[in-house]
Image (cartoon, helix red, strand yellow):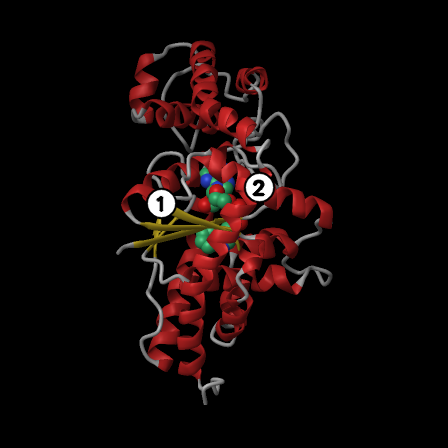
Amino acid sequence: MYRVFSGVKPSGDFHLGNYVGAFRQWVADQREHDAIYCVVDLHALTEEIDPAYLREKTYEAAVNLLSVGLDPEICTIFAQSHVPEHPRLTWLLECTATMGELRRMTQFKAKGYGQETVRVGLFTYPVLMAADILLYEADRVPVGDDQRQHLELARELAQRFNSRYGQTFTVPQAAVPTVGARVMDLQHPERKMSKSVDSPLGTIYVADEPAEIERKVKKAVTDTDGEMRYAPEEKQGLANLLELMAVATGETPDEVAARYTRYGDLKQELAAALVELLRPMRERRAELVKDPATVHQVLRAGAARAHEIAAATYERAAAAVGLLGLGC
Ligand code: TYM
């Protein structure tokens, strides 16, 4: 069966970009494929994070994935650190990747390039991500646009490993949505909406109350020429709003642009559409927070299933490179 794998880092609160770029696809994929979704807590250690905060956000991530509409009866949800093969395979892949290719990763360049105090884990993090994917023999990896380069690396490492040691890994494909692959910050539409950037007014969190969503959309930065058209290069703020409306209604951004003449009307209707889009999540989350036993049980069952798959792949890879198995 076709296998889908993806992950989210519990380093902060989930936002509309995560929902539109990733979770929306995850929910659709769970019905058609063998879908495995991971809260990648080890990735959150690549930057400063308070231990209690990490624990809390990892738990909340599981709650959010359930409330977004993932059904643990038909897909697998687990925490990365519960499956020890992730760091184990990472080592084999670190001995496959090169310094040069990791230095070219744009996310590393943006966050840590040239700083002596940056954590080694931030540099090697794309290899851990490749291990996440390759362990599950994923055919398809639904992600937002910012993960494309990491996916390319995962493909490259799989191919290199296979040609060096024999067929071991499935070479994964990135699945990036055509609309909403890069949701931009509402206050700084030249940069993506992000968990790690402090932009309270520019970021819509999935847990925001309707009044907050309305306030943020109303204050979103657009432009002064007042011309309603979809032009992502020239009119980034407006293009972002048109794309979000397109996601909410299933139209194209151009079709949305054709329906409005005034920015204010678009904003007002977009705010209402986003409130509706996020409403089911808000309601399910309110139920789930009252039921931690269910959330923990989902993570335990998910880890057991994930471990079964990951252990088999890891053993194959370890044998391929020449590690002496315990069975000798
Ligand atoms: P993370 O936690 O930053 O984001 C989770 C998912 O949300 C998408 N995303 C966005 N999509 C559209 N617009 C945005 N502004 C936006 N911001 C985030 C991301 O593309 C991602 O799909 N390295 C990954 C997590 C990871 C992973 C993996 C993903 C670790 N291992 C294996 C897939 C497969 C990350 O930090 O995503």
Quarter where residue 170 is shown? bottom left
The residue at the far bottom in this view is 328
Q: Position of residue 276 (x, y in %)?
A: 44, 19
Q: Is residue 162 left or right of residue 283?
A: left
Please state, as top left, top right, bottom left or bottom right, where the C terminus lies in the image: bottom left
Q: Is the residue under label 1 in contact with that under label 2 (CB below 8 Å)?
A: no
At label 2, counting other C-alpha atoms closer than 10 Å, the crowd grade (few under 14, some 14-19, many 20 or more) is: few
Nearer to us of marks 2 and 1 is 2
Give the residue displayed 57% in from the left and 24% down from the top.
Answer: 208
Find numbered disc 2 in the image and state the secondary structure of the residue it sits on. Answer: helix
Quarter where residue 87 is shown? bottom right
Kindly identify the amino acid type of the residue bearing the numbered disc 2. Answer: Ala
The disc label shown at residue 293, or none: 2
As displayed, is residue 275 above or below residue 200? above
Q: Is residue 251 left or right of residue 285?
A: left
Determine if residue 282 is in view: yes
Q: Position of residue 282 (x, y in %)?
A: 52, 25
Give the residue displayed 52% in from the left and 37% down from the top.
Answer: 64
User: Within 8 Å: ligand 1 and the Cβ of disc 1?
Assistant: no
Find numbered disc 1 in the image and state the secondary structure of the residue it sits on. Answer: loop
Please state, as top left, top right, bottom left or bottom right, where the N terminus lies in the image: bottom left
Kindly identify the amino acid type of the residue bearing the numbered disc 1. Answer: Ile
Q: Nearer the viewer, residue 328 or 164?
A: 328
Q: Which residue is mark 1?
A: 74
At label 1, counting other C-alpha atoms closer than 10 Å, the crowd grade (few under 14, some 14-19, many 20 or more) is: some
Q: Position of residue 116 (x, y in %)?
A: 72, 63
Spatial CA span between label 2 and label 1: 19 Å
Determine if residue 104 is in view: no
- Of mark 2 and mark 1, the one earlier in the sequence is 1
